[in-house]
Amino acid sequence: MKVTARSEGEYFVVTVTQRLDAVTAPEFESSCIGWIDEGHSRLVIDMAALDYVSSAGLRSILSAAKRVQRMGGGLALCGLAGQVQEVVEMAGFDRILPVHATVDDALRQD
Amino acid sequence: VRSVKEQEHSISSAALVAGFCIIALTVVMAATANSLALWADVIATVIDTAAVFLAWLVGRTIRRSNRESFHFGFGRLETFASFGMGQLMLLTGVILLAMVVWKLLHPSELHGFGVYLSVGGNVLFGAFNMYVFARSRRLEKVSESPTLRAQRHLFLHKAYSNLMFIVALSLALLAGDQRWAEYIDPVVSAIIALTLFLAATQTMGSSGLDLVDRSMEEQDQLLILRALAENFDDYVALHGVRTRRSGTRRYVELHLEFDPDRPMGEVQDIIERLRKRIAEMIEAAEVTVIPARAAPGGGGR
């Protein structure tokens, strides 16, 4: 897994690639929590280059979503496809988090 | 209406009684047919019967035990029995393979009345083994018992072995004095041993992982997340999810942080809602929601 982040106006875009599973989820979660605690409360998670996400990966996203919610912010997902989209929908995350086709779409919304 | 556990025990009892009868008959057949495969089958039947005895013993223990002494049920005992059955199946396979090697070094043809007797006997045994397999499979769908799973693997293999014996003995009878007919017996025995290894590996693999507190399947983990997503606004933070399997049971532990200003009654309602929702989606799940203020120590997220 590789996770990078950049500011886009009031949004903070987190790009995660390769696999987000039980091995990589703790690193992803601690990175997100670090950025949130720095004050970035409007996260956009770009999953377009993510090949696989497991339940552990989704749990780390849920934890991050709860954290930004407490700060009055929000977390959106974008670039879902294939297995990643299937799993996100199976867990019902598409009903609680905004889902966009691309990062640009996510930045244009809200 | 008999409970699943009672039906499970009655299958084991029937299989145990039949096992003793089959051992006696197989000894007669092997002695009169000069067949390595049939002698190996005697050993296999003895060990298989020991495995069935193990399942029967566990069933009896569960039926007679005082539930107050086992609040978390008998999942571990059932899994342990299933693992034991797998080990016995593996032992049978090893003995069978050793006998195959011996027979290949010292080939001899099958003969005698026992060959005819064996064909008939294997048709009967095969029908009985298929019956136990079918009943175990039907009950397993309801109870997901590891003992029934092991029993299903065992009896499917036994039925398959019966079919192989019928084919081998019939071929030996048809081949008469042909030199190659001497190798039918060890070749069939080798095939039976290999399928036995496969069945033993499957049984031990699934039971072994359950014995070391394996987490629940990914599919079930996603259903837990679904329940958490459905109640997204009812808790403040998710501090951890821990799951484990024990026999037929599934244990789910959710560490959730709630708004400290929320009345206890409301928190209890949320916990109950979550527990019910997960139990609806995952059969035999026992859900515990632990209100937490900080992430609990240790892994298992």
Image: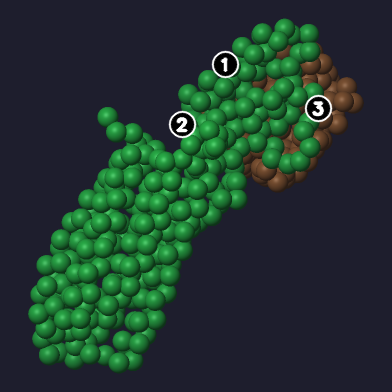
Chain colours: A brown, B green
What residue is shown with label 1? Answer: B273
Identify which residue is drawn at 79% across, 13% down.
B260
Structural distance between the alpha carbons of marks 1 and 3 = 22 Å
Asked if residue A7 can be seen in this view, the reply is no
Furthest-right residue in view? A38
Please state if B194 lies on the left or on the right of A22 as rendered.
Answer: left
Residue A29, quarter of the rendered image: top right
Q: Amino acid at mark 2?
A: Glu
Q: Residues within 10 Å of mark 1 (few under 14, many from 20)?
A: some
Front-most of B161 and A27?
B161
Mark nearer the N terminus (2 vs 3): 2
Q: Secondary structure at mark 3?
A: loop
Figure check: B134 above or below A83: below
Q: Secondary structure at mark 1?
A: helix
Q: Amino acid at mark 1?
A: Arg
Structural distance between the alpha carbons of marks 2 and 3 = 30 Å
Front-most of A81 and B279?
B279
Q: Amino acid at mark 3?
A: Ala
Give me the chain letter of mark 2: B
The location of residue A33, given as percent across then percent down, is 82, 30
Please state if A18 lies on the left or on the right of B169 as rendered.
Answer: right
Give me the chain letter of mark 1: B
Q: Residues within 10 Å of mark 2 (few under 14, many from 20)?
A: some
Identify which residue is drawn at 35% across, 82% down.
B99
What residue is shown with label 2? Answer: B283
